[in-house]
């Protein structure tokens, strides 16, 4: 993305580019999700060439969880640990550390935190700690989906004081409710996320 100067203090976060989201046969396919992969791969290459760390978030749910509609949640079962749906899309270049979320049945929207769907208690993933250890001050966020996991990750990154860059061309939206995409973009912009084209 023009304007993103990668380097040792700039990180790239690739959110949930997994078969269940990015493959038309996936159980929670995000329309045109596969179309972002080539652009994301270009960002991975640019980041790596400049010495920027790359992180990948990966939904990794148990077969039964309150996160799924079968357990009282809103989503169809998806990204069940070890399944084809949970695997990264085969066209995605994976060249960095993987942060798994939702492992114990928690809601795993943000790459930075998970929430117990019953108690509401939040706890951090390893991502914030790792970015701190590396001295990262700016985070580029790409992937799926813009109105859920990308949005939650970008907002959490801002809450941690990071400069956050979100290239809209490298995400797609679920739009469970009409207008979710616009509301997500507005919320991110209001939080100071640098939303680009």
Image (cartoon, rainbow, N blue to C red):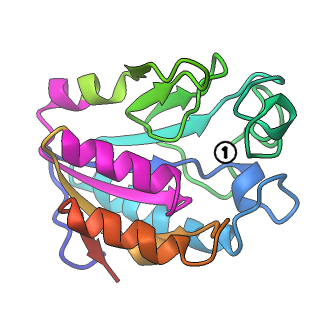
Give the side of residue 158 with respect to residue 149, left or right: left
User: Against 194, is 87 above or below?
Assistant: above
Residue pointed to by mark 1? 88
Residues 10 and 148: in front is 148
| Stretch of the chain drawn in magenta | 131-159
Residue 52 visible in the shown view: no
Question: Percent x, y for residue 65?
Answer: 75, 24
User: Against 138, is 41 above or below?
Assistant: below
Where the C terminus falls, by quadrant? bottom left
Q: Which residue appears at 54% of the width and 70% of the height?
A: 180
- Circle 1 — which element? loop
Question: Percent x, y for residue 112?
Answer: 37, 33
Question: Percent x, y for residue 119?
Answer: 54, 17
Q: Quadrant of residue 137?
A: top left
Give the side of residue 15 with respect to residue 21, left or right: left
Q: Quadrant of residue 105?
A: top right
Q: Which residue appears at 36% of the width and 56% of the height?
A: 141
Question: Percent x, y for residue 108?
Answer: 55, 34
Q: Which residue appears at 83% of the width and 33% of the height?
A: 83
Residues 6 and 107: in front is 107
Where the N terminus falls, by quadrant? bottom left
């Amino acid at each position: 993305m023009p304007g993103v100067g990668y380097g040792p203090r700039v990180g790239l976060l690739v959110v949930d580019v997994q078969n269940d989201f990015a493959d038309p046969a996936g159980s929670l396919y995000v329309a045109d999700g596969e179309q972002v992969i080539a652009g994301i791969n270009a960002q991975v290459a640019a980041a790596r060439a400049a010495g920027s760390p790359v992180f990948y978030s990966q939904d990794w749910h148990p077969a039964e969880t309150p996160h799924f509609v079968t357990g009282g949640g809103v989503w169809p079962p998806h990204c069940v640990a070890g399944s084809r749906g949970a695997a990264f899309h085969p066209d995605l270049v994976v060249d960095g550390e993987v942060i798994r979320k939702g492992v114990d049945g928690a809601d795993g929207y943000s790459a930075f935190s998970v929430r117990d769907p019953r108690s509401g208690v939040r706890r951090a993933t390893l991502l914030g700690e790792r970015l701190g250890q590396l001295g990262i001050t700016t985070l580029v966020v790409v992937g799926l989906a813009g109105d859920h996991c990308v949005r939650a990750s970008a907002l959490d990154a801002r809450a941690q004081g990071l400069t956050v860059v979100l290239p809209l061309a490298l995400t797609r939206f679920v739009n469970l409710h009409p207008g979710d995409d616009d509301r997500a973009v507005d919320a991110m912009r209001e939080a100071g996320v640098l939303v680009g084209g």
